[in-house]
Amino acid sequence: MQKLFSLIFLLALSTACQQKETSSLTASNEVDAGRKFLRAALDGKFDIAKAYLLQDSLNLNYLDVAARGYERLSQADKENYRVASIIVHENKIENDSITLLIFSNSFKNDQDTLRILKQGDKWFVDLSYLYVHPASLNQP
């Protein structure tokens, strides 16, 4: 009987942990989605970053390229990215479902732009925009 109780307890605990982990991978708004995506990428946690990514082949390929580039960094650079702060310079709301987030990080203070899209009630990062947008958007 005690083994059955232990098994049920462990199963309930496991389910609760999985629900908490899943709920923490949702963004409450566009800035939150961008910030969580960037934090995961700076930390080298590309599996978590993928949860905030617009799921299409181009975005998945860009994320894969970023992950491979991160793996080639020195340990010192990886640590510098991990401790870097995310700096949001501007949040340009294009309409109710598209936002441009101009950002940098405290390690490499290069401004860049992410497009964040709302699909249904969730926000996702369109990483491809980082590579194809006009460079003039990054200027202060």
Image: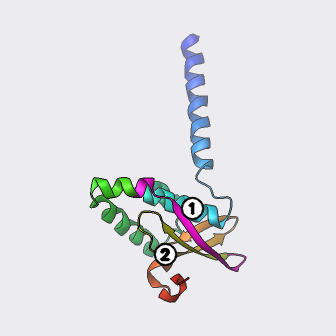
Could you tell me residue 81's position as x and y percent? 40, 58
Quadrant in which residue 125 is drawn:
bottom right
Looking at the picture, tell me which residue is in the foreground, 36 or 1. 36
Which stretch did the figure color magenta?
81-97
- Describe residue 65's horizontal placement relative to residue 43 as left or right: left
Residue 10 visible within the image = yes
**Disc 1 to disc 2, how far (Cα)?**
14 Å
**Does residue 83 belong to the magenta stretch?**
yes
Is 119 colored magenta in this rendering? no
Q: Quadrant of residue 1?
A: top right
- Percent position (x, y) of residue 11? 57, 29
Relative to 128, is 70 above or below? above
Residue with the mark numbered 1: 35
Q: Position of residue 43 (x, y in %)?
A: 43, 54
Q: Answer yes or no: do the residues labelled 1 and 2 have beta carbons within 8 Å?
A: no
Q: Which mark is residue 111?
A: 2
